[in-house]
Image (tube, rainbow, N blue to C red):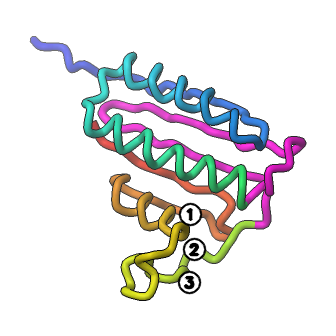
Amino acid sequence: MEQANVQTGELFTLQLPSKYESITLLENLIEEVADKYQIPGDTFANMMTCLNEAAVNAIVHGNQLDESKTVIINADVESRRIVWTITDEGPGFDYNNLPDPTAPDRLEELTGRGVFILKHLADQCIFNTSGNEVELHFKF
């Protein structure tokens, strides 16, 4: 009789000081996880884009570049999916009432596309009630 390949979950955690240079540590973790679980290139690219965006938003908007505040990144890998959680120490934001970055009057804007990117590149994007934590789901 064939044995099912059952993979138990694995959790990765990273605590980042709220400065731009911390993004390198996150990118290293994404690469480590992608290599270990043989994540396909398109999923890897989407994860890298989304996690960079979410972490920079947490560092800049959530924690206001206050290096005494931390951004916590968790990656929970189970079977053929990864759930990344990005949490900052800020007050959060109203993610339900953001201007549409595809509206004609917003196309020239240099900012304001982060949540739009997360919702379109991740398989699922879930914010907590206050908006200082986001869960990004990726299937591979």
Residue identifier under label 3:
97
Q: Amino acid at mark 1?
A: Phe
Q: Is residue 3 above or below residue 97?
A: above
**Residue shown at 41% from the left, 41% from the top:** 47
**Residue shown at 79% from the left, 60% from the top:** 90
Q: Judge whether residue 35 is colored magenta.
A: no
Q: Nearer the viewer, mark 3 or mark 1?
A: 3
Q: Amino acid at mark 2?
A: Tyr
Cα distance, mark 3 to mark 1?
13 Å
Q: Secondary structure at mark 1?
A: strand
Residue identifier under label 1:
127
CB within 8 Å, label 2 to label 3: yes
Q: Quadrant of residue 139?
A: top left
Residue 113's disc number:
none
Residue 75 image position (x, y, % from top left): 53, 35
Cα distance, mark 2 to mark 3?
6 Å
Q: Secondary structure at mark 2?
A: loop
Residue 73 image position (x, y, % from top left): 63, 39
**Residue shown at 45% from the left, 76% from the top:** 108
From which residue to which does the magenta span run? 62-91
Residue identifier under label 2:
95
**Residue shown at 50% from the left, 74% from the top:** 109
Q: Secondary structure at mark 3?
A: loop
Q: Earlier in the sequence, mark 3 or mark 1?
A: 3
Residue lying at the far left in this picture: please name it.
1
Judging depth in this view, the residue of 117 and 105 nearest the camera is 105
